[in-house]
Image: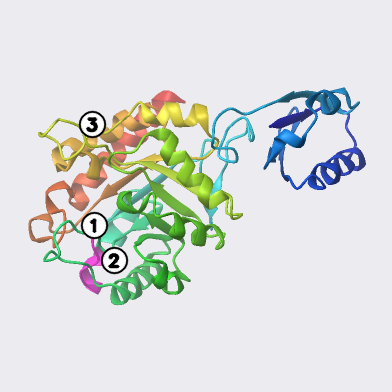
Amino acid sequence: MIAVLKRDTTPEQKEHLIQWLKRMNLDVHVSHGEQVTILGLVGDTSRVDMELLTSLEIVDTVKRVSEPFKQANRKFHPEDTVVEIGDVKIGGGHFAMIAGPCSVESEEQIIEVAQAVKASGATILRGGAFKPRTSPYAFQGLKGEGLRLLLEAKKATGLPIVTEIMNIKTLDMFEDVDIIQVGARNMQNFDLLQELGKTHKPVLLKRGLANTLQELLMSAEYIMSEGNENIILCERGIRTFETYTRNTLDVSAIPVLHELSHLPVVADPSHATGKSKLVAPMAAAAVAAGADGIMIEVHNNPSCALCDGAQSLTPAQFDQVSRKILAVREALL
């Protein structure tokens, strides 16, 4: 349920109403917009007398929210959420370029790639330390050593880092990580999501390869229900009957998510297509659809990469794609 307050409501009147609602065991989320203030009510709202609430002098309108996701809902929070990572902002017109290797392989590799992508416009460095792989015999990442090398790359370039967590047990190791990524396979690992909700650290939440947009937003709701609103949604492709590409990039998900939610949305054309030659057109399409950021895999020697070399760009190719992305954004402004 949401209650829209009138513009001339005083802070004292608003606080009095909030306390009254909290006495009904409701969580009250306040959203201050340019024109109105909205109170989002979460909990058993059947206790609330809508007619009584509507009749209050300071209340303009009262509506029930039919969607199961509440805090992630744009009705609760009409203004775009802007997630801040140091000097980098994502959402609300702020665009982020996220780039780096699928897996951290060595100090030389990660620092070389980090320096190259920063020179080409990247604002966030990605790199896998813990790697969820379909085969138990495939490279699983350098784990703790990979995290250490990512921090060395951050020290060398100043780029904030994003890397994937796979298990609650390793959460303490992510203390110095700027953005914690929840991969597609863990999108519905609800215990993990709730723990991340208690950290207040930015979370990049990837859509599962067979999940609906409502399920993605409900996963975001798990994080937000614990108090963490710093969430970035990521469309990374879904599984369809098509076999020519690794997955199918659901470009339509980007405007739909923006309509349904206030959270920023980024796209990952590398995992979506699985082919380096398709990354540039799909990145441009995602930007044209309104993505708040693009996440691209870059490796200094893709043919020798220990993970996902086929979908990785070289630093020179990333530089070209970066220019194309910026040109599309300028055309849309």
Q: Earlier in the sequence, mark 1 or mark 3?
A: 1
- Disc 1, SS: loop
Q: What residue is pinned by disc 1?
A: 102
Can residue 6 be seen in the rendering of this structure?
A: no
In the rendered view, how is the structure colored? rainbow
Which quadrant does the N terminus fall into?
Answer: top right
SS under mark 2: loop
Residue denoted by label 2? 130
Q: Can the viewer see residue 125?
A: yes
Gap in angstroms between the C-alphas marked 1 and 3: 20 Å
Residue 327 vertical placement versus 28 (above, below): above
Cβ atoms under marks 3 and 2 closer than 8 Å: no
Q: Is residue 234 above or below residue 255?
A: below
Q: Nearer the viewer, mark 1 or mark 3?
A: 1
Residue at (24, 40) in percent of width and height: 272
Image depth: mark 2 or mark 1 in front: 2
Disc ID at residue 281: 3
Q: Earlier in the sequence, mark 2 or mark 1?
A: 1
Residue type pointed to by label 3: Pro
Residue 114 falls left or right of residue 279:
right
Please report the bounds of the magenta region as a residue range: 103-112
Q: Which mark is residue 182?
A: none
